[in-house]
Image (cartoon, rainbow, N blue to C red):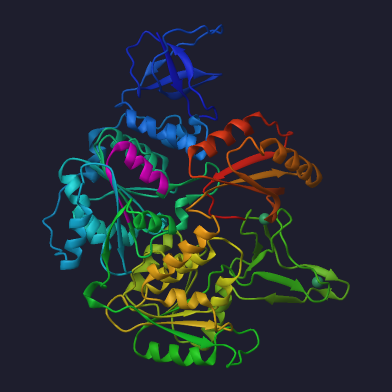
Amino acid sequence: MKFPILIPNIFDHAFTYDSDLKLKIGDYVIVPFGKSELTGVVWDEFEKKTNKKFVIKKISRKLDVPSLKKNTIKFLNWFSEYNMIPKGMALKLLLLSNNVIRKMSNEIYENFKIYIKKNKIELSKDQKSCLKKMNISNQKFRVHVLQGTTGSGKTMVYFEALKEIINKGFQGLILLPEIGLTGQFQNKFIEFFGFKPAVWHSGISKKNKEVIWSGFANDKIKVVIGARSSLFLPFKKLGLIIVDEEHDQSYKQDEGVTYNARDMAISRASFENIPINLITAVPSIETYENIRKGKYSKSRLDQRYLNASLPKYEIVNLNNTKLDVQSWISKEIIEKVKSHLEKKNQVLFFLNRRGFSPHVLCKKCFTSYSCPNCSINLVYHKNKQNLLCHYCGYKTLLKRDCSKEGECDFIFSGPGVERIFEEVKKIFPTKKSIIFSSDTMNKKNSVDFLKKITNNEIQIIIGTQLISKGFHFPNLNCIVVIDIDLSSQGHDLRGAEKNLQLYHQLSGRAGRAGKPATVYFQTYNLDTKMIADITNKDPDIFLDKELQIRRKNNLPPFQRFIALIITGSNEKELEKESYKFKSFIEGAVEGRVLGPVNAPIFRLKRKFRVRFLIRGRKSLKVQNSLAKTIEKFKFPTGMKLTVDVDPINFN
Ligand SMILES: [Zn+2]
Ligand SMILES: [Zn+2]
């Protein structure tokens, strides 16, 4: 009998194989492919007749693991169509590597065994009422949004919801952004449930991945806390998906196979016909529009836990105070910070810029350090003693003789967190301070750092946006935003939304244990609409306004955007081809073709980049017409097209 087998590679179709085995859709098999053997899946209905002339190879064997569910296959097919990704690549997200399927002994799952604890945590009245709303029509697909102020105890509400699902024998998936630092979250989970969840992200070992993979396929593991890719685990009895911090932009996978994990989670829930809960303090604009239309139900927690109040906001006008040369912290702020420190409050200086300085220039020879591979300045990292490209990873030393008069004389323009750290050290030499960024927080030391911050052994934190991600620091009652003006730059259509989310999350770190807290914004620009928006207690006011702007300008979520990026190493040839490409797809695609324009980062990793934007209706027809057209366009060798459906970054 002939079977269509999908293989995890770049092909969009299944391959025909022969076998005498009794196989059904979803069975995992090993098949010969080229010179090697690959794991594949029986994908479609069996072919009744084949007129194919080529030799049909035989399936080597069937793997002993519960077969992939039909609904999951349907989901993967849809995923590939929506995101314009070959079906084989969608399967690759699920299969990970060629030999993920292994026989596991039963003891290996001992760690994940479930002992549901008698609940000691009593929900508040508000939390209970949210839970009740959340659990309405919990038997089938529906989307519920729990919108709650930072620190209002949203987690406990969805933990309760998940507990009920697990008690009924189902599996649960909790998606989280920034999974690498989930120590705090895991402890919270264990304290509530009494057992360990599986934790899934790109950093876990291959061995662990194999255990977790088969644990879910065999229904031996019940709950996973995971990054984007956990969405593709082969759940046998998935009963509930939770997307925490659903607004978080890091749910969007920008490189390689591009997709938005929040949106794909919603569609997986729909194919599995199970409920999904989106959790947030400020919903994303897409989610907000769906609530407004009544597509999603919603509950709201407005009161902070233990009746803690939200932080106050204060604007520090930098026009009135003179900053010292090479200094970024005003006298006014120093006084305020001192008084916070006297009260044993922890202080956070926020600047969303890694390293020491974003731009280095020699005033003797005017050499400016930019990346040889990208059209981007190199960032000086003093701690690492080098200049770094944040896009391609290029590294070089600062030391260089440029002029005949000897060594270069450098000007470092603008601060990064390392530079603020130096300034803080000078102003508060007796206080313990640390830098909280992706350069300093790694898996090894983060547990120790987080513990020290929680125990108030560290008085001052200098942090990038990494610190805005859901941490709970009970003593943090003062946040200083070094440069709010920096955030209002840029020309991103989502800029306003991104800022609102970032500063809302950031200020949510302050005042969580009930003490009064303040967020200070240093600014030269006093009539910024942005500060008014982010300091408004009710984010819905901003979201309503933003939706009006988006509707008026035909922007998402009212229209579908698809970004196309063509890259090539020859600038001239790239320009020529992109105009050829434009006339080729225009008219054939269901939507308007905007571009080509040079990408804001015109050169990246040694390739020049040109962008298009397709703007169309929210219909799969846009993707389908585009897929059909670009398939026929042959780019010269060395040129590459990348498709990004629902883009978030426009670099
Ligand atoms: Zn670079
Ligand atoms: Zn020089």
**Residue 123 colored in magenta in the image:** no
Residue drawn at x 57%, y 88% is 318
In-front residue for pair 375/599: 599
**Residue 267 colored in magenta in the image:** yes
Residue drawn at x 28%, y 46% is 142
* Rendered position, 230 above or below 304: above
Residue 369: which quarter of the image?
bottom right
Q: Is residue 107 visible?
A: yes
Please identify the dominant SS of the magenta region.
Answer: helix
Residue most toward the right? 404
Residue most toward the left? 118
* Rendered position, 250 above or below 343: above
Q: Is residue 350 visible?
A: no
Residue 566: which quarter of the image?
top right
- The picture places residue 179, in percent across and down from the top left corner, at 40, 55
In-front residue for pair 515/317: 317
User: Which quarter of the figure is the C terminus placed in?
Assistant: bottom right
The span picked out in magenta is: 263-278
- The picture places residue 509, in percent across and down from the top left corner, at 37, 72
In-image side of 551 versus 614 (left or right)? left
Rendering quadrant holding ligand 2: bottom right
- The picture places residue 599, in percent across and down from the top left corner, at 68, 54
In-image side of 433 versus 600 (left or right)? left
